[in-house]
Image: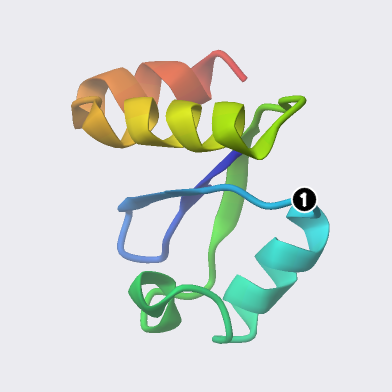
Amino acid sequence: MYVLRCADDTFYTGYTTDVERRVEEHQAGQGAKYTRGRTPVELLHVESYETRSEAMSREYEIKQLSRADKERLVDTS
């Protein structure tokens, strides 16, 4: 599970089995539709989980946070 800061200063949260590869995809405009027009992106936060289900649950939790809470999360990384 990872959090990016996009060029327009918004956050993007996602999950993957290979964070480095996924960030490269986002940078190349081949990642999520949301990030395609918002490059370059900056990797701010990474969390690892044993299962995909755990990562997806945490991704959902982070997406529900306010911007201020997301900023606190990435500032503690």
Q: Position of residue 15 (x, y in %)?
A: 59, 47
Q: Position of residue 22 (x, y in %)?
A: 70, 64
| Residue 67 falls in image quadrant | top left
Which residue is at 65% across, 39% downward? 52
Q: Is residue 30 left or right of residue 74?
A: right
The residue lying at 45 percent from left, 36 percent from top is 59
In this view, the residue in front, 29 or 9, is 29
Task: Report the side of 44 relative to 37 (left or right).
Answer: right
Image x and y of residue 35, in percent: 42, 72
Rendering coords of residue 18 (x, y %): 80, 54
43 or 49, nearer to the observer: 49
Residue behind mark 1:
17
- Number of callouts: 1
Please, is residue 46 above or below residue 32 in the view?
A: above
- Using the image as rendered, state which of residue 52 and residue 47 is in the foreground: 52
Q: Nearer the viewer, residue 72 or 62?
A: 62
Residue 38 in the figure: left or right of residue 44: left
